[in-house]
Image (spheres, rainbow, N blue to C red):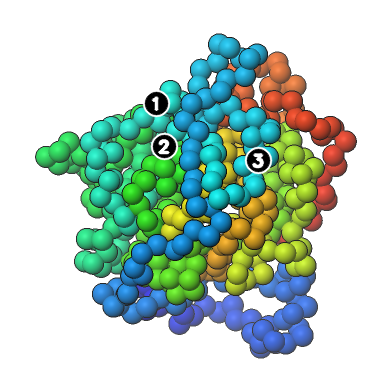
Amino acid sequence: MEVDIQKSLSLGLNRRGGRNNHSPPKAMCNKDSKVFTMLDSMGLVSKPHRCPIPVSNDPDKIVIPTGRTSDKIVKKLMYVMEDEVPNNESQSSPLFGGHISWKQREESFKPKSNMKVHCGFIQGGGADMNRVDVEYVKKCKFVVASGIFDGYDIPHQPSNISPRSKKLFCFLMVVDEVSLKFMKENGTVTEDNDGGKWVGIWRIFLLKHPPYDEPRRNGKVPKILTHRMFPQAQYSIWIDGKMELIVDPLLILERYLWRGKHTFAIAQHKHHRSIYEEADANKRRKRYARPLIDLHMKIYYHEGMEPWSSKKKTISVVYDIPDVPEGAVIIREHTAINNLFSCLWFNEVHLFTPRDQLSFGYVAYRLGDSFKCFMFPNCEYNSIFVLHPHTREHSSPIEWVKELDQLKKNSNLKESRGGLGLFTPYPADLDSVVLPHVTRTSKAG
């Protein structure tokens, strides 16, 4: 089965109905040819933007696995709930992600049978939820989740959803108060008899008192900590707020998890394989303060994170994969090891920059063989959704910082509740760390 948008693409038609005239030479079409191999190694072979997803034909015929995948490494995972404020910060209020020490961070990367780690939701740290929403999600075992913060998007209704999936899945849209206000003014928000709010199929889930100054960092709370927000969920599919889902979620779980007996799936990045290449692109596109991105990468390089290469041992069980994912779609079973990975991934976002694509590969590297991930082809990723533009451009002052002196001279540029690991003395000399050279293999950024 292929979604409608794929039918024209697989026939070689463009979006206007005409035939695509940019056919590659026969030598390039033959992926076993020496010409193709040579050009591909040089980065001269363009990857298809979309390709058909090999999903099953009928959602009603999907057999859902019984029980849960057994937890062989981490059997009991607990979470730190109270913040331990350092002695020199006696006036500091609790942080949503906690004041994580370097020692605690290091210990968290050593999987054990019983573990207790930081994983957001520290008492008094913000991200409060209404009781009516908390009660509603207790029934949700299969979740499609999304999120909108600071009014940058509006909910897009999924299409091609089967009656079976509409009954099986909870479609949960996490928003802040700014976004909810924007939705009420620019759309139709309805309320049920229990006080729950809806926009079409999406059940609106209000996150009060956002824990961070930066909306992009707030958005990582439901995206990465889905298992904490919806603790009864066994499976979840995350999709960014600017996207319209066009594939039945049950077919997605069958294709990316159950068919290959995977528990965590995410797409390969279209352009970048190395986190250092992704960091370079982030600096060029002004996604965060340039010197803080460099500091973030220096920590990872000092801690042994080498640039990606084809000879590097990877985390995928199927593909020779990059260290950089496309993080806008995440498909997972909420096993203990996956929950641990999500906690540690979020901790890196909490401590350093909010660019989660920079920290995903690092956390996978630190967990080693304990964490297994299926990174599927990027062209399939682009066939899962239709991308819509933001309602407005996002920009924050810290994204324009070019020198650390700017942060020292103007404290208003600095985030007060996120990225504090970048301003906490690191237990090693980072000034002597020289980041690896980046060869720009694409025009991205």
Q: Amino acid at mark 3?
A: Glu
| Residue under the point 39% across and 36% down | 151
Viewer-side residue, 377 vs 389? 377
Q: Position of residue 43 (x, y in %)?
A: 73, 68
Disc 2 or 1, which lies upstream in sequence? 2
Viewed as shown, does residue 66 lie left or right of 442?
A: left
| Residue under the point 26% across and 61% down | 168
- The residue under label 3 is 107
Q: Circle 2 — which element?
A: loop
Viewed as shown, does residue 295 lie left or right of 331?
A: right
Q: Is residue 277 above or below residue 126?
A: below
- Whole-angstrom CA distance, mark 3 to mark 1, is 30 Å
Viewer-side residue, 5 vs 248? 248
Residue 436 visible: yes
Q: Is residue 262 above or below residue 403?
A: below
| Residue under the point 55% across and 39% down | 117
